[in-house]
Image (spheres, coloured by chain):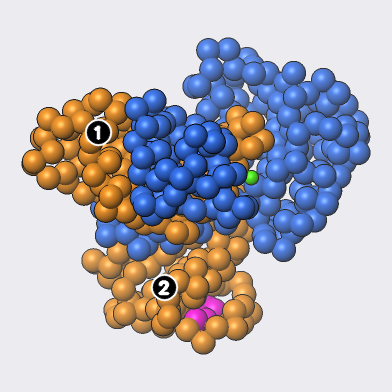
Chain colours: A blue, B orange
């Protein structure tokens, strides 16, 4: 199956290059945009469709029935709230045509998160939320702390996982578990315990039944 | 000194609330925007100036001489490249008036990174770069891997640091160093070695002279 990406912008450009750089054989990508005149990318695995994704025909042209995933990005030419209205509309359209395809929708404003979820998005990606946290961290930094750059390094070289912690670890400390996991090349960042996320927990904290580990490898 | 933030958008809204939520006494903020009619935020520590930051008078009004930091955000109403041209212009203007104030400038496109640096930005913040990496990770995720949410948790609860590793650790392994640091509540994410960043290094890797640690606490 191919991946349908809606919206041409700097984020989708980079996203497509990430697929290229990280795969010997990148997945087929159908890029849908209503303003670009022609395929903005000289890449053979990218097929371009100029069309309006609020109408069913565009999705049929993009062969939604055989697609694997859909990514809907925020329309940069609109104001933030209006971009979110549009993303909601596009999500409803795609969801109406295909009931169970994973749809990842980018949302710019906090208030529209719920609507995009209601429209049928599988994952709502609140990019401004993470971005403002990054800027905040960068500002607090001493000038040596290049939070953006470090996170980019983390994200481009590591995968983040969530996994149940084996029963045998119950009662043992975070310190012990981290040490053991690291021998296997896994770096434990934190726990998910009863829906709550605990990043960099106290080393003496004891593992409880039901704890899950967030780690990278 | 106060903080000057240029541009009203969802990122600056969240950024200002981060200052509010994380400080008993938040720093004074001067928000400069050319389109907003009046102060968009009902917060006493935020002073609003409606004005064009390509002219010196606006910066004088914002009392740049006594400011501590400047944040210039991308203008959402412009296309990405044009938003970057504008950010370059604003950076040049601010740098021309104040030679040594830290200026953090958001850049949307890769090509304009250098120009913003040349214009005098202290830190260039490439938000689209990090965002596309996040979306990429999210897409690869099994659906359990909520990369965005985890990173938001990391960023909102932890600080990232870079620090030289004490000489006594030379020749010891990453596994040993991680274990010791964790006892002090510090989680070692990786190394900076000869300009190169190594995230989640091999546990048996030996510490070398000059290595610096990237850790959170
Ligand atoms: Ca930086
Ligand atoms: Ca998510």
Q: Is residue A141 left or right of residue A127?
A: left
Residue A110: % across, % down: 67, 61
Identify which residue is drawn at 80% across, 56% down.
A115
Identify which residue is drawn at 30% across, 47% down.
B182
Q: Do the residues marked 2 and 1 share a common chain? A: yes
Q: Which residues are magenta?
A: B46-53
Identify which residue is drawn at 21% across, 31% down.
B173
Kindly state the secondary structure of the residue where label 2 is placed. Answer: strand
Identify the image quadrant of residue A149.
top left
The answer to whether the residue bearing label 1 lies less than 8 angstroms from the nearest atom of ligand 1 is no
Q: Which residue is mark 1?
A: B174
Q: Nearer the viewer, residue B178 or B118?
A: B178
Identify which residue is drawn at 11% across, 34% down.
B170
Q: Is residue A205 left or right of residue B67?
A: right
Q: Which residue is mark 2?
A: B4
- Magenta stretch: dominant SS? strand
| Residue lying furthest bottom | B44
| Residue lying furthest left | B167
Residue B170 in view, yes or no: yes
Residue A20: % across, % down: 54, 21
Q: Nearer the viewer, residue A196 or B8?
A: A196
Chain containing mark 1: B
- Say above or below: B26 vs A105: below
Residue at mark 2 to residue at mark 1: CA–CA distance = 41 Å
In the rendered image, the quadrant that contains the N terminus of chain A is: top right
Residue A63: % across, % down: 83, 22
Identify the image quadrant of residue A92.
top right
- Indicate yes or no whether the magenta region holds residue A133: no
In the rendered image, the quadrant that contains the C terminus of chain A is: top left
Residue B28: % across, % down: 41, 81
Q: Is residue A180 left or right of residue B204?
A: right
Count the marks: 2
């Amino acid at each position: 199956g191919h991946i349908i990406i809606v919206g041409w912008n700097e984020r989708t450009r980079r996203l497509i290059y990430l697929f290229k750089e990280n795969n010997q054989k990148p997945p087929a990508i159908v890029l849908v945009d209503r303003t670009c005149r022609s395929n903005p990318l000289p890449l053979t695995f990218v097929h371009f469709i100029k069309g309006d994704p609020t109408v069913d025909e565009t999705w049929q042209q993009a062969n939604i029935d055989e697609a694997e995933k859909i990514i809907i990005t925020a329309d940069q030419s609109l104001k933030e709230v209006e971009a979110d209205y549009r993303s909601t509309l596009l999500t409803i359209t795609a969801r109406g045509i295909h009931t169970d395809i994973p749809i990842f929708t980018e949302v710019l404003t906090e208030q529209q998160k719920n609507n995009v979820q209601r429209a049928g998005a599988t994952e709502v990606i609140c990019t401004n939320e993470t971005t403002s946290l990054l800027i905040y961290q960068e500002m607090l930094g001493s000038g040596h702390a290049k939070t953006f750059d470090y996170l980019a390094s983390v994200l481009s070289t590591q995968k983040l996982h969530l996994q149940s912690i084996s029963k045998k670890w119950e009662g043992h400390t975070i310190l012990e578990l981290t040490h053991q996991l690291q021998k296997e090349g896994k770096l434990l960042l934190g726990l998910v315990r009863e829906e709550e996320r605990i990043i960099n927990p106290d080393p003496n904290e004891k593992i409880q039944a039901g704890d899950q580990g967030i780690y990278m490898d």
